[in-house]
Amino acid sequence: MLDKEGWLPQAKALRVGQKRRVAHDCGSGTAMIVSHEADRYTSFCFRCSEGGIERKEPTLADMVELRRRAQEDAALRTATLPLPMTTDPREWPKEARLWLYRAGFHDSRIKELGIYYHKPSQRVVLPVVEDGKVTYWQARAVMPGQKPKYLNPSVDRDTVLPRFGEGPVVVLTEDYLSAAKVGRVVAGWSLLGTSMKDPVLARAVREGRPVLVWLDPDAAGRSAAARIVKELRAVGIKSVNIESSKDPKLLCLEEIRECLIASRAPGLRMNSDTVEEIEEVSKGMSPD
């Protein structure tokens, strides 16, 4: 039986229903797993081949949290949107509203995209809709200290491609909101990450439009963008990387338009008709 002093404080730091690999004082690495269940704390060290248990009386808060986690786990096994939905941003906590407002998404646009607040998980849900059918969703953490950043359903996501807007070029972004923001000017597609999936590449080939890669301006984004541009060019797609000081979602529509037009210089060679079409699409739009 493991000494409680070596594992119980770590188990008590978990929320009910959680388990985690942690370090044990028997050596280096995370050789021990601890858990917090409704009626007990448990541990097992794979290096020591021993475990421990500390029973407890479940509280009402424990039972509420356990039920919430069970609902969350059930929701993660399907692409069906988690319920209940709070669709009016005026009824959301301020943290949820501000996350979208800071990216220039206001109430009318939020409702148009079907974005809503899910009270049980305290997250903003971003639905992915294709041909009128929900195929995927992300639930984004908005409360201080909330982890993980995103919850996603455990379904095949290789063919999932959030697409917004139309235009003479396609812009690949890293996240949902950036694609939705760019989609106000041209076609915005979200990779939901930094890798080019085969079905997305195949779709780009079929559509035949130039593709601009516009990922987040951090080291991971820059490296991934360079790799994706090479992949696109290897299959004959005109492509160029767009670099900006901020994520696309944090730019106003005028700034997005300027970045798109400027991208014709370094290798993409957009013709004048393409530039005029981008200008026409975005003409008269107020900053978002």
Image (cartoon, rainbow, N blue to C red):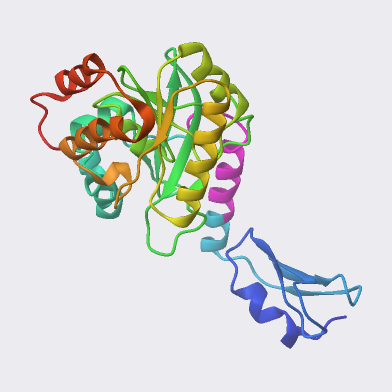
Q: Left of 267 or right of it: where is 196?
A: right
Q: Is residue 11 visible?
A: yes
Who is closer to the viewer here, 198 or 269?
269
Q: Left of 110 or right of it: where is 140?
A: right
Residue 104: quarter of image: top left
- Across and down, in percent, residue 91 comes to 24, 43
Query: Residue sitting at 76 percent across and 75 percent down?
Result: 29
- Determine whether 118 is above or below 45 in the image: above
Q: Quadrant of the N terminus?
A: bottom right
Who is closer to the viewer here, 176 or 108?
176
Query: Residue sitting at 16 percent across and 23 percent down?
Result: 279
- Across and down, in percent, residue 195 comes to 56, 39
Q: Left of 86 or right of it: where is 251?
A: left
**Magenta stretch holds residue 210:** no
Give the overall secondary structure of the magenta segment.
helix
**Magenta stretch holds residue 67:** yes
The span shown in magenta is: 66-81
- Determine whether 280 is above or below 56 in the image: above
Query: Residue sitting at 72 percent across and 79 percent down?
Result: 7
Residue 35: quarter of image: bottom right
Q: Quadrant of the C terminus?
A: top left
- Across and down, in percent, residue 215 comes to 41, 43
Q: Left of 77 or right of it: where is 276?
A: left
- Across and down, in percent, residue 263 comes to 30, 34
Q: Is residue 194 visible?
A: no
Query: Residue sitting at 31 percent across and 21 percent down?
Result: 165
- Determine whether 109 is above or below 35 in the image: above
